[in-house]
Image (tube, rainbow, N blue to C red):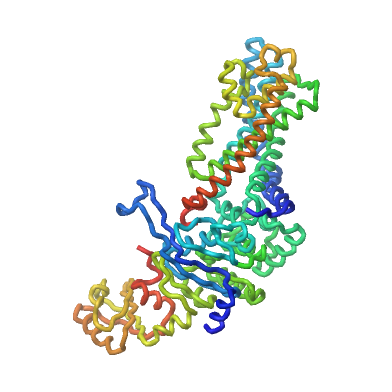
């Protein structure tokens, strides 16, 4: 953190937000439970340094995409300010656009009738890249993501994984100083997601002065890729630190996973018990899986007693190392896989 | 926005026009949908004119109108509502974050659409004249070409203006396009001289540049016959078309700026969840 602080003091901030807030006003027919407004971002303060791969981790509806859209000049904030590459996103969006690119998960951009190479060439033209240079970069990047043999394939013949690799190439093709990756591996198979993660990691190693802001709700992705992670829920940043530090904060707590049979709900039984900091549960192969964060190991005895008294049979008990998922559970009170209510 | 440079401007125009250029060669279905189907409608008018013993030039009115319909369709469906489709597919946000001029994107759409539609319109003219043996002789080719070009510039200027207006709306844009389609066939006089509708109707319909363009082109093709049917003189129509071209291009630029800004504030540049 010392280095990070030093760079911040030197003004080497790639992205900065100050009390950034966005409220969406709903039409009458869209009103939810009588509410005509949704607070998508709530006074967000962030600083991302040059050369950093910064993660925004949060469930669906947490405000990650809203934040990216504001930083990418696609959405105006309701209040607060944001700067990208030193330029204010509201007052000087054109300057911001000179430095950025963006790739979203599940993107269906481009034209199916065009080949992969033609699509990428088209987008390169919007950045003023000469054709010869664009084609050189396209060939180079396609080969890095294992698509060299697909350059002449029409886009409507690509699988969703191939299409997303093409989108990734599109994002990096313009050599952006700051790249926004919004759930880039959403819905992809394991192998494709891994290829994309490897590519992103390698690109940043090769271009250490560039910055990537990645949003994801896959905690292992944030853990694996990001130098720092901000945990966001209901529009608010709850924590921001390197993944190791976030997990370290939990190490004074104890994390257990219990599998119990005979009951369908442990949350009501255990919520509020002394020593129980957070818990989440879900059914798994007919058993109730309970993730428990305890402030002291001794609390486990009372937990097991109460479960036993309620007729539950303990099938399995594991003590686990804290993960970012546990960090999220501890901060929010529910698991990352559960959507924002 | 700061000037992205004329090279980037030109590259953007060509880049965005490219899918439309290439579409003509890759999707041959247009031969059926954009040449054969319009010819059915043209045929109906040709046979009506023949049945009532109208001069052969009247069939020429219908064939020329049938060809110009291709441009109107293109302006409605591939210009006006295009940004709505682009929003649906996720292209719009990529256009908007690119450090290029939005006008260059619109011009690219227009240039590509115009080129591809000219191939279609030429198909209608070619098959129509061969099939119905209508006379198409232009006394002043340069003037005819000038009217045609000015008609297209102002028409695609209108398309660019509508495109920026429709940026704000979603599905409503699609409905509005549908609403504009058939009435314009009638009020712009695609199959008959527009003067038949009366001066004031023709005057209002002249806001759609094809109305005046068609009238002027018919006058240049059939000067004698059109003496009785012309709406305004070619010179006046040419002047109005030039004015409309400048007006629509100016309004489209201002409109794009205004509606993009409004849509950004209201969160309507992208779809939710996109």
- Residue under the image location 53 percent in, 49 percent down: B261
| Residue at the bottom extreme of this rendering | A298
Above or below residue B234? Residue B106 is below
What is the x, y in percent for residue A74?
53, 56
The number of callouts visible is 0
Which picture quadrant has residue A316? bottom left
Q: On the picture, is B173 further left or further right than A133? A: left
Above or below residue B143? Residue A137 is below
- Residue under the image location 35 percent in, 85 percent down: A253
- Residue under the image location 64 percent in, 31 percent down: B244
Q: Nearer the viewer, residue B126 or B188?
A: B188
Q: Nearer the viewer, residue A253 or B2?
A: B2
What is the x, y in percent for residue A122?
68, 54
Above or below residue B173? Residue A309 is below
What is the x, y in percent for residue A196?
59, 69
Above or below residue A227? Residue B199 is above
Residue A285 seen in the figure: no
| Residue at the left extreme of this rendering | A309
Q: Nearer the viewer, residue B209 or B74?
A: B209
Q: On the picture, is A283 further left or further right than B57? A: left
What is the x, y in percent for residue B69?
63, 30
Q: On the picture, is B148 further left or further right than A253? A: right
Which picture quadrant has residue A294? bottom left
Residue A54 seen in the figure: yes
């Amino acid at each position: 953190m010392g280095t990070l602080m030093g760079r911040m003091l030197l003004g080497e901030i790639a992205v900065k937000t100050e009390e950034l807030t966005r409220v969406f006003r709903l039409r009458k027919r869209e009103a939810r439970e009588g509410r005509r407004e949704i607070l998508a971002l709530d006074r967000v303060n962030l600083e991302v340094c040059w050369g950093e791969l910064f993660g925004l981790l949060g469930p669906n509806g947490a405000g990650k995409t809203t934040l990216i859209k504001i930083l990418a000049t696609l959405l105006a904030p309701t209040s607060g300010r944001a700067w990208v590459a030193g330029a204010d996103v509201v007052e000087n969006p054109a300057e911001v656009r000179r430095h950025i690119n963006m790739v979203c998960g599940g993107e269906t951009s481009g034209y199916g009738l065009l080949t992969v190479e033609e699509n990428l060439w088209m987008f390169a033209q919007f950045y003023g890249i000469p054709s010869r240079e664009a084609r050189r970069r396209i060939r180079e990047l396609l080969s890095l993501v294992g698509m060299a043999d697909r350059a002449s394939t029409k886009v409507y013949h690509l699988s969703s994984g191939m299409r997303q690799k093409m989108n990734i190439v599109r994002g990096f093709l313009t050599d952006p100083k700051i790249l926004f990756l919004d759930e880039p591996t959403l819905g992809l198979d394991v192998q494709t997601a891994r290829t994309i993660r490897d590519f992103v990691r390698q690109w940043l190693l090769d271009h250490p002065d560039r910055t990537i802001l990645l949003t994801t709700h896959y905690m292992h992705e944030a853990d694996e890729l990001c130098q720092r992670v901000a945990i966001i829920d209901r529009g608010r940043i709850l924590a921001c630190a390197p993944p190791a530090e976030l997990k370290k904060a939990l190490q004074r707590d104890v994390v257990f996973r219990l599998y119990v049979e005979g009951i369908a709900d442990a949350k009501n039984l255990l919520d509020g018990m002394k020593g129980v900091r957070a818990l989440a549960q879900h059914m798994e192969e007919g058993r109730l899986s309970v993730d428990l964060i305890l402030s002291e190991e001794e609390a486990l005895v009372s937990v097991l007693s109460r479960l036993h008294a309620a007729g539950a049979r303990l099938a399995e008990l594991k003590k686990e190392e804290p993960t970012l998922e546990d960090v999220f559970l501890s901060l929010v009170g529910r698991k990352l896989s559960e959507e924002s209510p | 926005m700061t000037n992205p440079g004329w090279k980037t401007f030109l590259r953007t125009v060509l880049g965005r026009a490219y899918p439309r250029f290439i579409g003509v060669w890759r999707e041959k279905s247009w031969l059926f949908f954009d040449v054969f189907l319009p010819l059915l409608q043209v045929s109906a008018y040709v046979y009506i004119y023949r049945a009532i013993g109208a001069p052969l030039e009247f069939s020429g009115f219908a064939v020329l109108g049938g060809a110009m319909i291709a441009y109107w369709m293109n302006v409605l469906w591939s210009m006006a509502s295009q940004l709505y489709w682009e929003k649906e597919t996720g292209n719009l946000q990529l256009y908007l974050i690119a450090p290029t001029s939005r006008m260059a994107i619109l011009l690219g759409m227009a240039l590509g659409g115009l080129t591809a539609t000219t191939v279609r319109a030429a198909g209608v003219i070619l098959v129509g004249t061969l099939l119905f043996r209508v006379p198409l002789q232009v006394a002043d080719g340069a003037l005819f070409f000038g009217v045609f070009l000015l008609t297209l510039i102002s028409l695609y200027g209108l398309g660019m203006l509508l495109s920026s207006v429709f940026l704000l709306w979603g599905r409503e844009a699609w409905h509005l396009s549908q609403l504009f389609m058939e009435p314009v066939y009638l009020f712009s006089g695609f199959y008959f001289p527009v003067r038949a509708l009366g001066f004031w109707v023709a005057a209002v319909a002249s806001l759609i540049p094809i109305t005046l363009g068609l009238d002027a082109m018919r006058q240049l093709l059939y000067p004698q016959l059109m003496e009785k049917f012309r709406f305004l003189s070619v010179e006046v129509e040419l002047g109005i078309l030039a004015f409309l071209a400048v007006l629509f291009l100016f309004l489209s630029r201002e409109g794009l700026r205004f509606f993009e800004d409004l849509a950004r504030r209201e969160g309507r540049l992208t779809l939710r969840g996109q």
